[in-house]
Amino acid sequence: MSTATSQPTASADPVPRLRDGDRLSVPEFLRRYAADPVVLSAELIQGVVYINRKRELPNGKGIEVTPISAEGHAEPDNTIQTVFGTYAAYTPGTRATSAATVLLPGASAALEPDGTLRVLAERGGKARVGEDGWLHGVPELVAETSFTSGPRDFGPKYTAYESAGVPEYLVWRTAEQEVHWFALRDGAFVPLEPDASGIVRSEAFPGLWLNVTALLAGDTATVLATLQLGLASPEHAAFVARLQPHGA
């Protein structure tokens, strides 16, 4: 009498680790990103992997996590998120997000901007939340709080956002105390300059007024008071009216 012996089931090949500088497609990047036990935050910019934060196990003795500066990044970023969130709260048909994965059109960019402000797709916006929970398409405004990431934010990220047709791009270089706001015109970013009062006015989002002088001085109360003036402006009211669905 013969007995059958079971053969071991071949295990699936392990997912390769995510490495700085790898050139990957968006699907492969997302597959490795989801499976990597070390990487905490990474982006694919023009087909190239950039790892932002990761856990390390040096000699198996512990876990090290790259720290985030409170004054260099976290506090300034919170201010920008407050501005975006307040604007969205008073502008039906828009949404603000913090660091969500954004899949720009094409096959070479999966980014995690520090903030976005967008018009809902059903109101004419060019970005939507997919079934995977990520943003797909082109948000109308992208923001980066840039403490140590200036070369990337003004290099490959700048190019990726410009090439994808992002209407506006805001970068706050906190160490240098500089705010750069760009608008897309004829396929290229050009600076939006503050007026004599130090206020920059968004073209993509009427009524979104940023008091750069107050922002750099750490005067958040004045930043928000200036924003309220923008929200009370006739151009903001007209924008809100345009965003409303027919028959509303």
Image: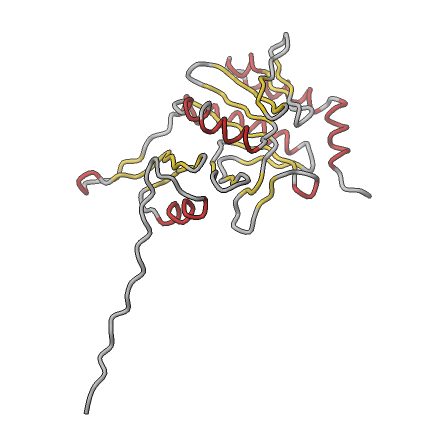
Residue farthest to the top, as pictured = 196
Percent x, y of residue 36: 34, 46
Colour style of the rendered protein structure: secondary structure
Relative horizontal placement of residue 72, taking residue 5 as reference (left or right): right
Q: Quadrant of the C terminus?
A: top right
Residue occupying the point 56% across, 12% down: 213
Identify whether 240 is placed above or below 103. above
In this rendering, is residue 19 above or below 75?
below
* Location of the N terminus (image quadrant): bottom left
Q: Please give left or right for residue 139 compared with residue 247 in the image.
A: left
Q: Quadrant of residue 234?
A: top right
Percent x, y of residue 70: 40, 25
Residue 175: image location, x then y, percent: 41, 16
Locate residue 49 relative to residue 109 in the image: left or right.
Answer: left
**Residue 242, image x and y in percent?**
76, 34
Q: Is residue 81 left or right of residue 10?
A: right
Extreme residue in the right direction: 247
